[in-house]
Amino acid sequence: MPAALKEVAPDLLNPERQRALEAFRRVRGETEHRAAPLSAEDQAIQSMPDASPTKWHRAHTTWFFETFLVEPNVANYRVFDERFAFLFNSYYVAAGPRHARPKRGLITRPNAAEVAEYRAHVDAAVEQLIFQASSAAWPEIARILEIGLNHEEQHQELMLTDILHAFAQNPTDPAYDVTWQPPKFAHKGGYVDLPEGIHTIGHQGDGYCFDNEGPSHRVLVGPVKLARSLVTNAEWLAFMNDGGYANPMLWLSDGWATVQAESWQAPGYWRERDGAWHQLTLGGLRPVEPAAPVIHVSYYEADAFARWAGKHLPTEPEWEIAARAGHFDDAFGIVWQWTRSAYSPYPGFTACDGALGEYNGKFMINQMVLRGSSLATPAGHSRVTYRNFFYPPARWQFAGLRLADYAERYSLT
Ligand SMILES: [Fe+2]
């Protein structure tokens, strides 16, 4: 940034640009805050193809701003390093060729300090835009800036899920932060009724949303009873002690194949030590707390548990309608909750043109929707219409479940 620009005090900006500047600095700062406990060695590791190194997340989110916001809008912008577009493009085919995802952990250069310089370089260019963009250009700049900030917040969650998976490969059970404490949870138990009715789901009105949250549309749901609370570790232990992981009748065919291939006997990161179950958390290895919500289970496991319990997983419309009505405890901030809804486009959904149209739409196949948010989701990034999605075997996310009960509807008595 030219030196003169640094003399422009933020309070001389109009309120909208001032808010944009504050949001930009807050989100970019949170990424660095999350990376701070990690050494350069920690930041380079990739423990599986689905997980990315911390350093890559820090650089990729920067590339996103450089490519989609700065380059199209800043005349004479000097790209920090021409080679970074290849290294740090994730999946945007329209933005050019890219490095193979499973090999991100083999990139030791640029090092972590150079990635910090890259971030500072692009930060200065974005701030220059916020200060100097013409009022004619501003609305589109503000739109892309908001997408970039929400994108970076998604990667902030992935930074924690991915480093926990990396630490889980280490027999010494490293801690991300020894002082980390799990979020408080409520467990009142019981079920709430969702009577039969036609409701509107999906995002409408003001406020940010990703494209996959619309169009809003009407759905018929119910009658169904939905669990007020999340499934707990104690309930999961009952499933395990009843042979849940050894009974093929409880599992979808693909799920049973995964149980056998992966030798699953418990949720992700559970370890038996001295005859008691422990789990690797962001705070290191801790005893499994029976009353706490179960975490790090796949769709396959959630589905098998529901079948064992004589229940089902809710659909995403059921989840959204009940959450909007305030029926749930712990809808947000503990675990993402698997639904039995496939990740499909809502009626009338079309992705926008260009590279940013690749953001969500092309992934609407073979994945399942999770609702809510988790302990790793950044503050302010949760919405009742938010659609998260992962492949059915994935369990390195902070994912759990709540149950649905249709017994009344389908009772033959
Ligand atoms: Fe990304």
Image (cartoon, rainbow, N blue to C red):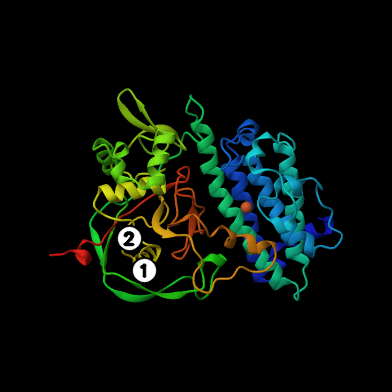
For residue 237, side relative to residue 375 (left or right): left
Q: Is residue 351 above or below residue 58?
A: below
For residue 76, side relative to residue 57 (left or right): right
Q: Quadrant of residue 270?
A: top left
Q: Dot 2, how many residues are within 10 Å of its Cα: few (below 14), some (14-19), or many (20+)?
A: many
**Residue 130 percent location from the top left of the image:** 73, 64
Residue 132 visible in the shown view? yes
Residue under numbered circle 2: 328
Question: Split into 4 quadrants, where in the image is the C terminus?
Answer: bottom left
Q: Earlier in the sequence, mark 2 or mark 1?
A: 1
Residue under numbered circle 1: 321
Q: Using the image as rendered, state which of residue 49 and residue 173 is in the foreground.
A: 49
**Residue 184 percent location from the top left of the image:** 36, 48
Most extreme residue toward the left is 413
Identify residue type, mark 1.
Ile
For residue 152, side relative to residue 68 (left or right): left
Q: Is residue 350 above or below residue 391?
A: below
Q: Quadrant of residue 257?
A: top left
Mark 2 element type: loop
